[in-house]
Structures are given as C-alpha cells and as structure tokens.
C-alpha cells in the first residue's frame, strides 16, 4: 500500500526536523495532498495511526488538506484548475500539462518544546 | 509552536530516481505498466526474441511474490532480476537502485522494467526511466483509459494487446483509441496480439529507434 510508504516518508521528514528540537512533542502535522496524488485520506490516516503508536507523535493529530489539480495549456500557456476529463483549455486545445496536484507535502507541524 | 516545513514527501523517491537516471544515461530504459495479466511478460518474451541479436537487453521484474516472471525472461537468454515487493503495489526508485549493481551496465543498450500489475500506483513513482509504456488488453473493457487516466497521461506509448480476442469482446477499438488520444494527444498507440505475434515487429522497430535516439542524446 503506497499510503503506508508515503506516510513513512512524511514521518521521516518530521524526524529529520525534530533532531533540532531535542525531546519536543508533536501536536499536529499538516499534510498537503494533491487530488492526483493517488492517496486516499482514510488510508493515510490509517497509516498515520499505525505508525505513531509511540515516540514524539504519540498524541499528534494529522490534518490533510486537499490541493487542486493545476493544468497548463501548451498552446496558450493559460493556467487553470482541472475539471472533469477530458481536459480542454478555453482556447480549444487539449494539449495539457499537469503542473500541480500530484504532490504530497508536509506543510507545517506544531510542536511543544519540552523545556 | 508552529514550524513551516513545506517539504515534498516524494523527494526521497525523486532523489533515487535522478541517481538511477544518471547511472542509466547510456541505456534506453522503459517502465511498463498494466493491470495484472494484460500480457507484460508475454510481450517481453516475444520482443526480446526480435531484439536480442541487435542490442544488449536486461530486464527487471516487479511482482508481489514469486520469481516466475524473471525465470520466464531468463529462459529467453536475457539477464533478469526479480524484485518482490511483498505486498507493495508498485516499484519505487530505491528498489531499482538496489538491483542495478546486479547488471553489467556498461554493456547494456536497453533496460526494461516490468512494474507490478496495477494501473494506478506505479504511475506515481518515477524509477529513473526514459519513458513509461502502458499496456492494455482488450479483455479489460474499453473504459479503462477514462477510469485510469493518469497512467495514460504519463506514458509515451500505449500498446493495446490481445486483439486476437476482439471477436469475443465488446470493445469499440475506434472509441478506445479516441479516448486515449483525448487524454494524451501526444501518446503513440499500437495494436498487437502476442498470441498470434501480430505487430510485434512494429513494437520492436519502435524500441530500436528509441535506443538510437538515446545513444545520440548521450553522445551530445
Ligand atoms: N489470447 C491472448 N492471450 C494473451 C496475449 N498476450 C498474453 N496473453 C495471455 O495472458 C495471460 C497473462 O499474461 P502475462 O504475460 O503473464 O501477463 P502480465 O501482464 O505479465 O501479468 P502480471 O505480471 O501477473 O501482472 C497469459 O495466459 C498469456 O498467455 C494475447 O495477445 N492474446
Ligand atoms: Mg508479468
Ligand atoms: Zn489554451
């Protein structure tokens, strides 16, 4: 399941950051998930629960923010949000490039410093 | 205390993919994606027969379990390494990085990676390939491209397999091809039958021309 491996990578990003905040506790992790990232929020939440039974995340909350799919027309360079398939530009062209909406980002985290 | 991070979770995979691409810069590398059973391994068996006396080929096989597909390819006289994902729904770039040392890369012209049978997740993971090929068999039904558009968007070649079975299917080939080109106007499409060895030559010719292109690019 790739939600599991994505969540592992997301926690790795947080781990790397937490090295600078010795012993701090994580309250909240905000993930930005593109609508084309092929990630189901429910499966991400499940992976999060399974992977955070202990350690600094034990009581952390996961917030998932869905990001829109952004397209760019190869003919007229217009950037717009995707609707239903097939994707066409207002200029009539269907030469479309995806420029956003496939990504998964750790947007921000909220922590309690111990001292 | 709130800390802004804005770090790409997929950056780990992307970094491995770029490292693979650098190692494979003289080797035309394809990532073949399809549903389970569309005929990826069968196509490889037919294809390597046509290509083996012209270019040096190696294959990486991705499956949840067993080494069967790698054994099938090895039986054609081609070096093949099996990756078992043990439940994982796709190959990732790190898995490829781990097995690349198993090949004599300096001698290769073509590396074919057969991904885990799945039309969804593999499309999301760059392995360091030059291009993706999506394979679709007519028995899956003609609605697959519009239901799983991402893999068609990201692929350079769409191969429609098992056309020998068209008389027993309700697929409208014209509509299917139109759907595919509406999703991706740049994609090249081919219709083949591995069973009857129909149009395998066309696929082989395409591979040879792509290998030539890659060699020209890597010299420049
Ligand atoms: N009728 C017909 N059968 C085919 C054709 N190509 C492959 N098959 C059959 O389809 C079945 C699956 O083929 P494989 O090549 O193993 O499919 P695959 O995509 O590698 O499957 P996985 O690796 O398990 O995802 C086999 O029984 C093949 O003989 C074809 O052109 N026509
Ligand atoms: Mg196979
Ligand atoms: Zn336009």
Image (cartoon, rainbow, N blue to C red):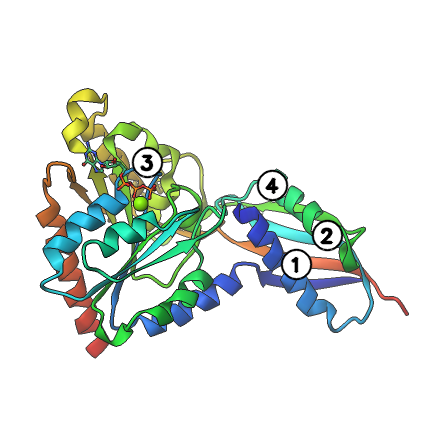
* Marks 2 and 1 close (CB-CB < 8 Å): yes
Q: Which residue position is annotated with label 4? A: A43
Which quarter of the picture shows residue B52? bottom left
Circles 4 and 3 on the same chain: no
Q: Quadrant of the N terminus of chain B?
A: bottom right
Estimate the spatial distance between the alpha carbons at disc 4 and disc 1, rounded to whole Å: 15 Å
Estimate the spatial distance between the alpha carbons at disc 1 and disc 3, rounded to whole Å: 34 Å
Q: Which residue position is annotated with label 2? A: A52
Q: Position of residue A71 (x, y in %)?
A: 42, 48
At mark 3, the secondary structure is helix
Which quarter of the picture shows residue B129? bottom left
Q: In terms of depth relative to the viewer, which is nearer, B8 or B202? A: B202
User: Left or right: where does residue B76 sit relative to residue A76?
Assistant: left
- Residue drawn at point x = 80 percent, y = 71 percent: A22
- Residue drawn at point x = 73 percent, y = 72 percent: A19
Question: Cβ of disc 3 within 8 Å of ligand 1?
Answer: no
Q: Which residue position is annotated with label 1? A: A11
Mark nearer the viewer, 2 or 1 = 2
Disc with the residue nearer the chain's start (2 vs 4): 4
Q: Quadrant of ligand 1?
A: top left
Q: Quadrant of the C terminus of chain B?
A: bottom left
Q: In terms of depth relative to the viewer, which is nearer, B188 or B182? A: B188
Q: Is residue A79 visible?
A: no
Tell me if mark 3 has few (under 14), some (14-19) or many (20+) residues whose alpha carbon lies within 10 angstroms of its own. Answer: many
Circles 4 and 1 on the same chain: yes
User: Left or right: where does residue A89 sit relative to residue A21?
Assistant: left
- Residue drawn at point x = 9 percent, y = 40 percent: B198
Disc with the residue nearer the chain's start (2 vs 1): 1
Q: In terms of depth relative to the viewer, which is nearer, A81 or A41? A: A41
Circles 1 and 3 on the same chain: no
Q: Is residue A86 visible?
A: yes
């Amino acid at each position: 399941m790739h939600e599991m491996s994505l969540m592992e990578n997301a926690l790795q990003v947080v781990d790397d950051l937490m090295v600078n905040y010795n012993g701090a506790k994580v309250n909240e992790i905000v993930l930005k998930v593109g609508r084309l990232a092929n990630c189901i929020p429910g499966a991400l939440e499940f992976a999060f629960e399974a992977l955070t039974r202990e350690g600094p995340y034990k009581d952390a909350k996961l917030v998932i923010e869905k990001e829109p799919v952004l397209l760019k027309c190869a003919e007229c360079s217009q950037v717009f949000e995707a609707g239903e398939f097939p994707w066409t530009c207002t200029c009539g062209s269907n030469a479309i490039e995806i420029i956003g909406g496939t990504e998964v980002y750790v947007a921000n985290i909220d922590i309690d410093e111990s001292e | 205390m709130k800390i802004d991070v804005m770090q790409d979770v997929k950056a780990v995979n992307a970094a491995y993919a770029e490292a693979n691409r650098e190692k494979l810069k003289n080797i035309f590398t394809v990532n073949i994606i399809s549903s389970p059973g569309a005929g990826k391994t069968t196509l490889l068996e037919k294809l390597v027969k046509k290509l083996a006396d012209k270019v040096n080929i190696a294959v990486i096989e991705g499956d949840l379990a067993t080494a069967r597909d790698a054994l099938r390819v090895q039986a054609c006289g081609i070096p093949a390494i099996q990756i078992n994902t043990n439940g994982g729904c796709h190959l990732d770039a790190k898995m490829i990085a781990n097995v690349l040392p198993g090949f004599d890369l300096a001698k290769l012209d073509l590396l074919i990676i057969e991904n885990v049978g799945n039309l969804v997740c593999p499309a999301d993971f760059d392995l360091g390939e030059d291009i993706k090929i999506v394979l679709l068999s007519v028995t899956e039904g003609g609605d697959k491209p519009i239901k799983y558009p991402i893999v068609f968007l990201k692929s350079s070649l769409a191969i429609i397999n098992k056309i020998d079975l068209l008389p027993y299917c309700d697929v409208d080939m014209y509509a299917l091809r139109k759907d595919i080109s509406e999703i991706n106007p740049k994609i090249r499409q081919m219709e083949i039958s591995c069973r009857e060895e129909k149009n395998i030559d066309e696929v082989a010719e395409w591979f040879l021309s792509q290998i030539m292109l890659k060699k020209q690019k890597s010299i420049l």
